[in-house]
Amino acid sequence: MVSVENLEEDNRNTETKEIIEKDQKMCDISNIDYNNSNNILPIFNSLKPKLIFNNKINDNNNSDIYKEDEITIINKNDIFDRYDFIDENEMEDQISNCNNSNSFLEKSLPESEKLLKKEQKLQKQQQHQSIQQYSMLYLPQEIIFHIFQFLDVHSLVQISSSNSLLQLIGNDNELWKKMSIERYGCSPVVPKPYFPLWKTYFKSFQIYKGIWDSNKKGKIFITNNYKTITHAGDYLGSYQSARGSEPIVSGIVYWEFYINTLSSNQTGFHLVVGVVPESFVIWQTYLTSNGGWGYLADGRKANNSGNGVTYAQSFCQGSTIGVLVDMNQKTISYFHNGVYQGVAFNNIDGPVYPGVSLLTGGQSVSFVENPKFPKLSQIS
């Protein structure tokens, strides 16, 4: 015979279960069709929508304010402005209650149903992840390329190893081909030794990241976070040189020098910019007399020479000199204010470094921060 106490207990359990199931149903929005407004409305209702009251009725006929059941609603066309969503703490309480309800129900299930529910949950998560991945996979290449435009080589390598989708995109040879052509103006054929991998070729393009080496300089001041050098001697002093901190051993590397200070009567060997070998002797020697490859202020070029030969346009204070070192072709090319001056030197051996020689006190040169890599298609 069933006691009254047992019946009351059963009723309480039934009521509790119904409440829990109702809460769970409210919390389960995984199957909502967001394109159907009839499905979205209960979500808004569950978030306790409240009409925005305005006690003053606008006399002029403002279309953004209208009267409905003696309540003035503002911004009729914007549904979100008609709702005052519950605060963060209350939302956390509701989520916590839902989680507790789910946990209570799951514990009361038979073991077989628990395993089934766990498997279904895992499948749903995998399906959701798969949909997200493939929806991105089939984005137009223009959009993917636009996203990748904001990443340097190191970041591109990092994201390609973060998940299977990005790894798939990161190894798309056609995408890397397009990026190489768009960003660097490459020809549509991968040159040796990179053939056929466009990704490897793309990664070979580098902006020089070094600074001036404080241990490899003459009588020179280094300032501006090691980006600027200034001759520290007298007006007619001896040659003082400096070199970059990081060696260039492979790839296609670009950087720019900005000429901060150079008097109009100081030309030729008064200031030389370019590239120096590992063996270059810094102290009281100019760049082109000790194995360096230099672009002189009067437009000449020189390598292991005190004279030099005519090469390009002269430069002066305020000029920007770009240097392109191609370790694949073993060449050095220069740019003057963005204009390509041609290949200056061939058959260079690495490792090499950026280098500058200054003759007169006060002369100053800086590395340009974050220069833009020139398009190879503009180089003829």
Image (cartoon, rainbow, N blue to C red):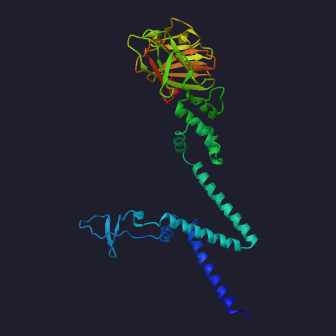
Does residue 241 lie above or below 198 as drawn? above
Taking the spot 38% from the left edge, 10% from the top edge, the residue there is: 265
Q: Position of residue 43 (x, y in %)?
A: 50, 68
Which quadrant holds residue 361?
Answer: top left
Residue 73 in the image, given as x and y percentages of width and height: 35, 68
Residue shown at the point (53%, 43%) measured from the top left: 147
The image quadrant of residue 49 is: bottom left
Residue 329's place in the image compared with 177, above or below, is: above
Question: Residue 157 in the image: x percent, y percent?
Answer: 62, 39
Q: How many numbered marks does the figure carry?
A: 0
Question: Compared to 272, does 77 lie above or below?
Answer: below
Residue drawn at x 64%, y 86% is: 11
Judge by depth and name the residue closer to the eye, 209 or 62.
Answer: 209
Most extreme residue toward the bottom is 1
Residue depicted at 58% across the width and 29% down the height: 205
* Rendered location of residue 269, percent (x, y): 47, 10
> From what the image shows, is residue 7 above or below residue 183?
below
Q: Is residue 56 left or right of residue 370?
A: left
